[in-house]
């Protein structure tokens, strides 16, 4: 019996009866990728038509996803110029974000490693692209602008947000990261989102990739020192950049708690289309 017909259906009833199954986004996959020049259209169609589903959404416990794109004008808004995340800082024009059920990280990782091995074997992985920033992450905090009046973080990847800003901050040590997280959660972010186009900010810390990960994905850096922030915007980032996002590095530097290594704006892709692909270069 082939792999495609032998699905071991009897095991699904057993697995469904055990383990956590809440809806809180306890973990995330955040992956920023650069298609190689000349491969933009082919990469976009492969990711949207196949990989977004077979390599992500069809997996157990990955329950929400959203793709984002940075056209050339958005790439040119990024900073700092010397980034520990992207070299050059404009690298990585596509961003994919996924929520994973709290407490199901290990279960999901077992599946994702196995399915990506299978996809590679079956020639269903597009090779002409570079993973600029790919990490599974644990959720640390969500700060809301409107309290209980707006969408929750569980809705963030389904709600029709007009844009997203990804901010990556590195602290000098694990202890300094704990202080940075406390400052972000209790002082800086509540003040920063008030009256802004950002309805919420989610804060994550990266986790190491397994040793049997795919070879084209480099091991995660800054596992003990890095935080990743996702700002979900109700306005196009270009319309509010100077007023709200052009200086996110300043308060972090003045607080002495870390260094902002990337601030990068994106807009949502339009699924099933090649919109924006001709504006990446």
Image: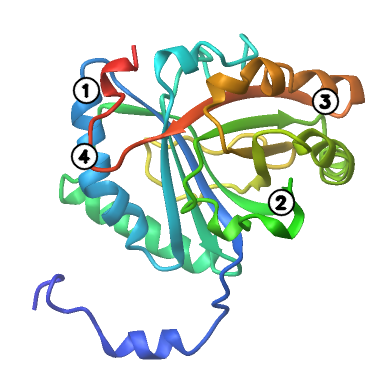
- Specify which label sits upstream in the sequence, 1 or 2: 1
* Residue for badge 4: 46
- Specify which label sits upstream in the sequence, 4 or 2: 4
Label 3: how many residues lie within 10 Å, few (<14), some (14-19) or many (20+)? some
Q: Residue at x 64, y 30 (%)?
A: 167
Label 1: how many residues lie within 10 Å, few (<14), some (14-19) or many (20+)? some
In the figure, 145 relative to 41: above or below? below
Q: Kindly indicate whether the residue at mark 3 contacts the one at mark 2 (C-beta within 8 angstroms).
A: no
- Specify which label sits upstream in the sequence, 3 or 1: 1
Q: Is residue 197 left or right of residue 184?
A: left
Q: Is residue 123 visible?
A: yes
Nearer mark to the viewer, of 2 and 3: 2
Secondary structure beneath disc 3? Answer: helix
* Residue for badge 2: 142
Residue 39's mark?
A: 1
Secondary structure beneath disc 2? Answer: strand
Cα–Cα gap, marks 1 and 4: 10 Å
Name which quarter of the figure residue 273 lies in. Answer: top left
Residue 5's mark?
A: none
In the figure, 111 relative to 17: above or below? above
Cα–Cα gap, marks 4 and 3: 38 Å
Cα–Cα gap, marks 2 and 3: 18 Å
Secondary structure beneath disc 4? Answer: helix
Residue 69 image position (x, y, % from top left)? 41, 29
Residue 94 image position (x, y, % from top left)? 40, 30
Residue 168 image position (x, y, % from top left)? 66, 31
Residue 147 image position (x, y, % from top left)? 76, 55
Say which quadrant the N terminus sits in. Answer: bottom left
- Specify which label sits upstream in the sequence, 4 or 3: 4
* Residue for badge 3: 252
Which sits in the foreground, 162 or 113? 162
């Amino acid at each position: 019996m082939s792999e495609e017909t032998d699905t071991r259906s009897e095991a699904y009833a057993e697995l469904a009866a055990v383990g956590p199954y809440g809806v809180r986004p306890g973990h995330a996959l955040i992956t920023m990728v650069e298609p190689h020049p000349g491969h933009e259209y082919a990469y976009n169609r492969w990711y949207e038509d196949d990989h977004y589903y077979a390599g992500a959404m069809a997996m157990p416990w990955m329950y929400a996803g959203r793709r984002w794109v940075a056209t050339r004008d958005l790439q040119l808004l990024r900073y700092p110029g010397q980034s520990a995340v992207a070299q050059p800082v404009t690298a990585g024009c596509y961003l994919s974000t996924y929520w994973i059920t709290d407490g199901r990280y290990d279960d999901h990782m077992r599946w994702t490693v196995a399915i990506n091995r299978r996809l590679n074997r079956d020639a269903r992985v597009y090779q002409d692209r570079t993973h600029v920033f790919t990490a599974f992450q644990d959720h640390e905090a969500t700060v809301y602008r409107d309290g209980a009046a707006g969408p929750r973080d569980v809705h963030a990847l389904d709600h029709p947000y007009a844009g997203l800003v990804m901010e990556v901050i590195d602290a000098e040590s694990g202890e300094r990261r704990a202080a940075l997280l406390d400052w972000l959660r209790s002082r800086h972010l509540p003040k920063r989102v008030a009256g802004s186009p950002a309805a919420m900010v989610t804060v994550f810390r990266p986790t190491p990739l397994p040793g049997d990960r795919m070879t084209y994905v480099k091991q995660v850096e800054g596992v003990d020192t890095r935080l990743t922030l996702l700002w979900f915007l109700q306005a196009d980032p270009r319309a509010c950049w100077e007023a709200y996002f052009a200086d996110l590095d300043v308060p972090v530097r003045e607080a002495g708690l870390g260094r902002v290594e990337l601030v990068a704006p994106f807009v949502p892709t339009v699924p099933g289309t090649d919109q924006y692909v001709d504006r990446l270069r």
